[in-house]
Image (spheres, rainbow, N blue to C red):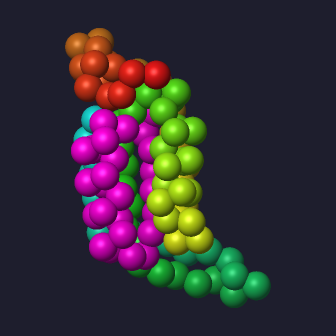
């Protein structure tokens, strides 16, 4: 199991993606956190910007599907997308996650 992390500076896009992932059963739930500060180096200059972070619990096997669908749907507007492993999880919650997400 993993947490999918999606970062965007487009609030409407972030909420649209969160709703889509839940409705299509690609994640069990989506947490949308606004006002996340992102600092990065752009051409030797540190730039800070506000971002929206979407996190969703899912099966690791669904990551490639999520990536492919979001690339097809948003193309060049595809936000930053990566996953973080869930190392430990309550057994009942783990079973619920497997049951509530798409079969792979």
Residue drawn 54% across the image and 48% down it: 67
Q: Position of residue 84 (x, y in %)?
A: 51, 40
Camera-side residue: 47 or 24?
Answer: 24
Query: Which quadrant: the N terminus?
Result: top left
Percent of width and height locating residue 39: 55, 75
Q: Position of residue 80 (x, y in %)?
A: 54, 61
**Which residue is painted at 23% across and 13% down in the image?**
92
Above or below residue 14? Residue 47 is below
> Quadrant of the rendered structure where residue 97 is?
top left
Q: Residue at x 48, y 44 (%)?
A: 66
Query: In the rendered view, would you say 75 is above or below 72?
Result: below
Is 21 one of the magenta-colored residues? yes
Asked if residue 82 shows in the view, the reply is yes
* 60 over 68 or under it: above or below: above
Q: Which residues are magenta?
A: 1-26
Q: Nearer the viewer, residue 44 or 75?
A: 75
67 over 15 or under it: above or below: above
Q: Residue at x 30, y 36 (%)?
A: 25
Q: Picture quarter containing residue 10?
A: bottom left
Q: Is residue 43 left or right of residue 46?
A: right
Residue 2, x across and y down, in percent: 46, 33
Q: Residue furthest front?
A: 72
Queried whether the magenta region covers residue 33, the answer comes back as no
């Amino acid at each position: 199991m993993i947490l999918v992390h999606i970062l965007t500076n487009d609030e409407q896009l972030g909420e649209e993606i969160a709703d889509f992932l839940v409705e299509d059963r690609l994640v069990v739930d989506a947490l949308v956190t606004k006002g996340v500060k992102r600092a990065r180096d752009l051409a030797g200059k540190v730039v800070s910007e506000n971002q929206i972070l979407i996190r969703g619990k899912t099966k690791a096997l669904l990551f490639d599907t999520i990536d492919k669908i979001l690339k097809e749907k948003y193309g060049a507007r595809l936000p930053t997308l990566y996953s973080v492993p869930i190392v430990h999880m309550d057994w009942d919650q783990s079973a619920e996650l497997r049951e509530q997400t798409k079969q792979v």
